[in-house]
Image (cartoon, rainbow, N blue to C red):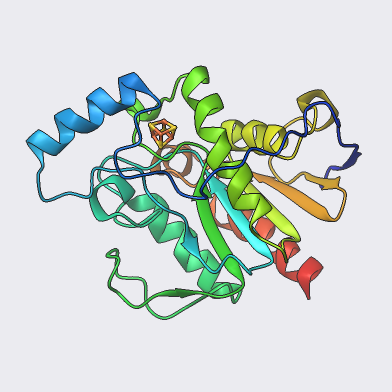
């Protein structure tokens, strides 16, 4: 069942932080992640091993917010959701609903093009065990705020998982209690619709928390609303 809520902006929380939309390659703001990044650079010198920039045109109407780069995926290849299972499901679904063109081949030079869609993450650096700390989520939010502020045509955001949902709410200056995370929910936030989905990770699909059909349903709603 679809949950729809309308949420009001909290002006006190809606601070616009002036920041670049993507962090510097050696962003120093999270000491634990910097140390982890340096270890990975030493171990895998041919990998990207840096904050992963957003992918897609800033003039798009749709923004997808993931959690953080996967070690073997975006952290290795440098493009969000590229190179691990989560990308297989995400890009297949985006292609099916007209938000991507080309053939996804799990590498950043595969020629895949996003259409009216941009992909970013709540946290730009790979965290140990895929688990960023609350302080890391909070400090990296300045880039999500800047990403959203620099999308003048933005109409829809799909948040993949509870952490992405909550960080996006805060980035929009909204109170989490007004819009609890639920797969399939849509929250109206001014001119922007925020859609929730379970994250398309291998773990979630292996455990059937998220099926490809459940994931497709979210993007079918987005496509219908944007059309
Ligand atoms: S997670 Fe974000 S804020 Fe923290 S070091 Fe990486 S890019 Fe910087």
Q: Residue furthest bottom?
A: 102
Please state which of residues 139 and 99 is positioned toward the viewer in this rendering: 139
Give the quadrant of residue 116. bottom right
Q: Quadrant of ligand 1?
A: top left
Residue 170 makes an appearance in the image? yes
Query: Could you tell me which quadrant the N terminus lies in?
Result: top right
Relative placement, left or right, of 7 versus 222 is: right
Between 186 and 62, the one nearer to me in the picture: 62
Residue beneath the point at 29% across and 45% down: 75
**Residue 79 higher or lower than 110, as above or below:** above
Q: Position of residue 119 (x, y in %)?
A: 52, 56
Q: Is residue 186 above or below residue 113?
A: above
Q: Position of residue 43 (x, y in %)?
A: 8, 35
Q: Of residues 224 and 41, which is closer to you in this image?
A: 41
Q: Is residue 182 visible?
A: no
Vertical placement of 162 versus 62: above or below?
A: above
The residue lying at 79 percent from left, 53 percent from top is 193
Which residue corresponds to the image point at 56% horizontal and 25% vertical from the top-left? 138
The quadrant of the picture occupied by the C terminus is bottom right
Residue 77 x/y as whole percent: 26, 55
């Amino acid at each position: 069942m679809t949950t729809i809520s309308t949420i009001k902006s909290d002006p006190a929380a809606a601070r616009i932080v002036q920041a670049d939309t993507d962090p510097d390659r050696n962003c120093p703001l999270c000491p634990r992640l910097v140390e982890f990044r340096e270890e990975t650079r030493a171990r895998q010198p041919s990998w990207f091993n840096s904050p992963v920039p957003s992918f897609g045109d800033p003039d798009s109407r749709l923004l997808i917010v993931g959690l953080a780069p996967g070690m073997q995926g975006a952290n290795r290849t440098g493009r969000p959701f590229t190179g691990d299972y989560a990308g297989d499901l995400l890009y297949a679904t985006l292609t099916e609903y007209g938000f991507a063109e080309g053939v996804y081949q799990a590498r950043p030079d595969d020629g895949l093009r996003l259409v009216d869609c941009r992909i970013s993450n709540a946290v730009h650096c790979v965290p140990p065990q895929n688990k960023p700390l609350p302080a890391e989520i909070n400090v990296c939010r300045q880039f999500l705020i800047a990403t959203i502020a620099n999308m003048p045509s933005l109409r829809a955001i799909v948040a993949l998982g509870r952490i992405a949902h909550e960080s996006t709410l805060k980035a929009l200056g909204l109170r989490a209690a007004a819009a609890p995370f639920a797969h399939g929910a849509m929250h109206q936030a001014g001119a922007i619709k925020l859609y929730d989905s379970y994250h398309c990770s291998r773990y979630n699909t292996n455990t059937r928390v998220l099926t490809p059909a459940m994931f497709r349903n979210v993007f079918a709603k987005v496509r219908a609303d944007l059309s």
